[in-house]
Amino acid sequence: MNFLILGTGGIGAFYGARLLNSSNEVTFVARGTHLEAIKNNGLKVEHPDFSFFENVKVSELKDINFNSLNIDVIILTTKSNSTRIICKELSQKLSNIKKSPYLLSLQNGVENEKVLCEYFPKEKVLGGLTRKIGAHIIKATGNVETLIGAIYKTKENTSFLEKLNKTINNSRIHSEVVDDINKELWKKLIINNGVNAICALLEIKTGILMNDKKLSSLVYGLMKETVSAAKACNVNINEDELNQMYELIKNFDSIKPSMLVDREFKRELEIDEICTVVINYNKKQNIDSAYTKTISYLLEFIIKENK
């Protein structure tokens, strides 16, 4: 298959390298100094079970000629706070092409697919998530799993999902097609809201957080607030599923979540996409999000003070 990886950070680089290694066509999109580094030095990915260091096709989005590339799938791995900006540019690029590609989001949050559907045919938008992975530029860890599913199911995209699923599995990344991808996105948000902001606030890895009895109780409170927020979107997550998400992060490798890495590199944090969405959906139900408010508001304050 022919892929475009839109966002060559940790996740994008890992997936792109795996797909290339199994004889797929892959074009990477990057920008700035990262783009120049890949052009000059090649793309490097290190994982306990896999290593990759090769020259690859890479350019800025504005320089991509979609008619000549004949892309099957665009995989978005950028920060969620840039999704709408990217959609505006990408929709212009795709407006006159002969073959419309599918768009698969592997981003954080539960709103990306909704934004994509505003700019592209709904039947072409695929939801997805990657879990059990800690990935930053160059290094990745974990037994990576991918879940994918159609936002609006058709006979055509159901058939395409099976083909895509086989391709991802053949690249030695475990992948499954799920019936309700929206619920799976919320289940991932349970973990993200549970650990992302608090790790960035305290500047600690997840292992330190989850091995502290008092701090881990805060994580559980953050996760419960995410479960209640999901109900505003008609997504019901039971207590057993909540506990499964809690145990998953408790027993996973100790990693730096994305917000902590972004804070270290002084990049914009996905606070709105991970925390504020929980606060707002609970507010619609007249439910307070005391844990999420406290952690995210403190983190926002510290970030502003340190600018």
Image (spheres, rainbow, N blue to C red):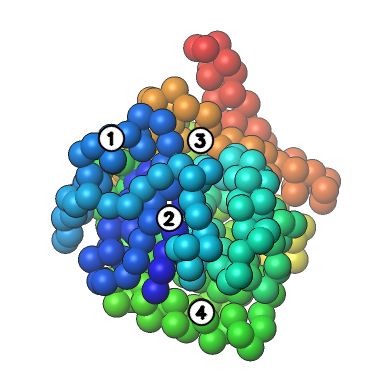
N-term-proximal mark, 4 vs 2: 2
Give above or below for 65 relative to 258: below
Give the crowd class for mark 2: few <14, some 14-19, many >=20 residues within 10 Å: many
N-term-proximal mark, 2 vs 3: 2
Label 3: state its secondary structure.
Answer: helix
Give the crowd class for mark 1: few <14, some 14-19, many >=20 residues within 10 Å: few
Label 2: state its secondary structure.
Answer: strand
Q: Mark 2 = which residue? A: 5
Identify which residue, 240 or 188, lies in the foreground: 188
N-term-proximal mark, 1 vs 4: 1
Label 4: state its secondary structure.
Answer: helix
Residue 67 in the image, given as x and y percentages of width and height = 53, 63
Give above or below for 279 relative to 17: above
Of circles 3 and 1, the one toward us is: 1
Could you give the CA–CA distance between mark 4 and mark 3, rounded to whole angstroms? 33 Å
Q: Mark 1 = which residue? A: 37
Mark 1 and 4 residues: CB-CB less than 8 Å, in contact?
no
Q: Amino acid at mark 1?
A: Ala
Could you give the CA–CA distance between mark 3 and mark 1, rounded to whole angstroms? 30 Å
Give me the disc on residue 161.
Answer: 4
Mark 4 and 3 residues: CB-CB less than 8 Å, in contact?
no
